[in-house]
Each structure stands twice: as structure tokens, then as C-alpha cells.
Amino acid sequence: MKSQAISRRQFLKTTTTAAVTSLAATAPLIAGTPDPKPTKAQANWMKLGYGMFIHFGPNTIEGVGWGDGRFPPEKIVFEKLDIAQWADIAAEAGMKYAVLTTKHVDGFCLWPGKHTEYSVKHSPMKKDLVRLFVNEFRKAGLKTGFYYCLLDRNFSAFENDEVYNEYVRNQITELLTDYGDIVELWFDGAWVKDHPTGDWPWDPAWEKNANSGLKHGERWQWRQLYNLIHKLQPNCLVLNNSSSDRPGWVKYFPIDARTAEHFDFIYRGKLCEPITNPVFTKPDGTKVFLPLQYEETITPGWFYKDADYLMHPSVETICDWYKRARSTEANLLLNVGPDAEGLIPDYNRYYLTLAAKRLKLP
């Protein structure tokens, strides 16, 4: 980023696994100017504090992390689907909101939208999973948010930016007009058209090379999309995944909150520690209030995968994640992947409810 903040290269040179200099402490601020305060929408979102991230869809059945966009809709059946069970577990865990993967990289939509045939309307279940999600979680007293992947491996005109961006805006309009109030929209996959490599890892050299091919949301018509979201739902916070190697950074503006995928993420031998200070310095030197949300998972991957055995994060680990997030006024969005039958496994419930008791969450 072209800013006064410490560069990623400088950070990686000075960081060790034994002692990490906090980027929050080193981010420069303009002297003599008052720190910006959270908007009402940001403040209300921060009060939620703890949420459930839910990765669910064709990948759950196929047993993969990233689908190729060709999984047949007629095979998408969850025999014991019980979204009320998910909501009950989230409430028991002391969570206050939940975010569902409405569309992942495979392009399959969990709602029967008008703008694609690759959706639940061609599943034998004939169920609008997004509507079931918002209905059941609201019954349980939780706010709801949506994950939406900009990368789409099913859309035939994906590389035609004008056509694809209109498709995205049409889908976002559906999600923000048909399902009531949404607390956050969590975007993923933007790197595929932003980064010269088309892959998620960041290279700080791109910013210094005018010919690198680095983009800042132009191909997504990001500002137009952001403005549409706030026209439809002014209080919906927009997040754009900065990727695991740059937790707490901002891909580009405008944005309402920042992401931090994983605690203690090691990339190429270096610890990637997030910028936790909610007062963020923009490339032009001005300051903006941008709260942080950690995203972590209690499953081996983001989606459920059947296995003979696995190592589950302990109650102490879950409690530590929560405490570390809240110590910097950040939210924790903890992922739980329902299984191929449509249920959250009992062992996940066991750890989550014990953690809630340990933390004395209401």
C-alpha cells in the first residue's frame, strides 16, 4: 500500500516468531488531529462481538475446500438438514450473529436467484437455504450476515468485467432486498483480478512497479458495488478479505471493517500479525475508524470434511481466541462447518458450549 504505514516487506524482515513488533503500535497518525470515532452501525456491530461463520454448500458434499463450479445441482441434498439446530448451537455458544456462505468460489448460490441456474432451485430439496438461515437465526435472537465470493468458477463470462459486475450487483440486490436487515457482507476472492499472479499471496513489490499489473478494485467496479450496498442497506458493514498473509490490512477503499483470517498464521516462515488499532491510516495520510473481525475455524478446513479422526481446538484455545479478539475490541467470527447431512456435529457443540460456560457468556 502507498501509505506512511510500515511496509509488509519491512514487517517481514523485522518479525520473528519469538518477538513480534505490533503493527498497531507502529502505524503513524497525523499529529494534532482527533481520532475518528465509530459510526453508529460500526458501534452496534462491535457490540455483537462473537459470531458463527458457516461454510456450507456443494463443497460440503464433495469434500473439497474450493469447488470447480461443475458439481451437479441434482446431487445437492442434505438428508437431515436442520438449520434450527445450527442456530440453537450458536445461541448456546453465546454468539450474537452469524454469517453464511451464500456463494463460494464454485458459484453455486444457496438461494433461488433470478440471475443464475446454478443454484438451489435445481436441487431436489427445492429449499431456499438463505431464507431458512435468516429465519432460524433470527428466531434464536441472532443477527445475520452474508459471505459472497467475487471469484466464480461457474459463470461463463467471468472475465468480461462489465457483464460479470452487473451479475454481481444483481445478486447483491437480491440478497439485500429479499432477506431483511443484514449486519455484514463479507467479500472474498477479489485477489483473482487484483493481483498480477491471480493468486492470494501479496507481494509488496507490486506497489513500487507501475507495470506490475496490480489493480485496486477497478475490475470489480468496487466503488459502484459499495455504494449500491449502502443505498440498499446503509447499516450493512462491508468487509473485503485481505487474505491470511495480510491480516488487518485494507485491500482498497471504501470499506467499513477489516478482516484477519486466522490467529498465529505463519507464511513462508514468518508470523503474520494483524494491525489491531481500529484507527487506520489511509494511503493519503488521513485516518479512518475501521474495526477488526478475526475469522478462525474449529474445523480442519473451512468446509466440513469427513475423516476417521481429527484434532479439535480445545476449549482453552477457543476461549483464548475470544479473549484475544475482544482485548482489542475486535469481533471473533468462528467458523463451524455443518456436515454432509446438514447438521453441526455433536463434538463441535460440546466444545462451543463448554467454551461459553468458561467465558461466562450469556
Image (cartoon, helix red, strand yellow):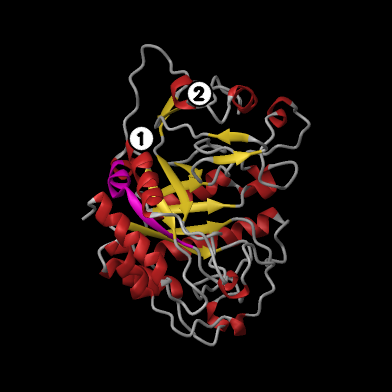
Q: Which sits in the foreground, 326 or 258? A: 326
Q: Are marks 2 and 1 in contact (CB under 8 Å)?
A: no
**How many neighbours does mark 1 have within 10 angstroms: few (below 14), some (14-19), or many (20 or more)?**
few
Q: Is residue 221 magenta?
A: no
> Where residue 200 sits: x, y (%)?
66, 46
Residue that numbered label 2 is attached to:
21
Q: Kindly state the secondary structure of the residue where label 2 is placed.
A: loop
Give the position of the C terminus as an image quadrant: bottom left
Is residue 79 positioned above or below 93 on the image? Answer: below
> Where residue 60 sits: x, y (%)?
56, 71
Camera sees residue 236: no
Residue that numbered label 1 is attached to:
328
Cα separation between marks 2 and 1: 16 Å
> Where residue 112 sits: x, y (%)?
51, 76
Q: Is residue 51 magenta?
A: yes
Q: Nearer the viewer, mark 2 or mark 1?
A: 2
Q: Residue at x 57, y 59 (%)?
A: 168
Q: Quadrant of residue 276?
A: top left
Q: Kindly state the secondary structure of the residue where label 1 is placed.
A: loop
Is residue 276 positioned above or below 114 on the image? Answer: above
Name the amino acid, label 2: Thr
Looking at the rendering, the stretch of residues picked out in magenta corresponds to 43-54
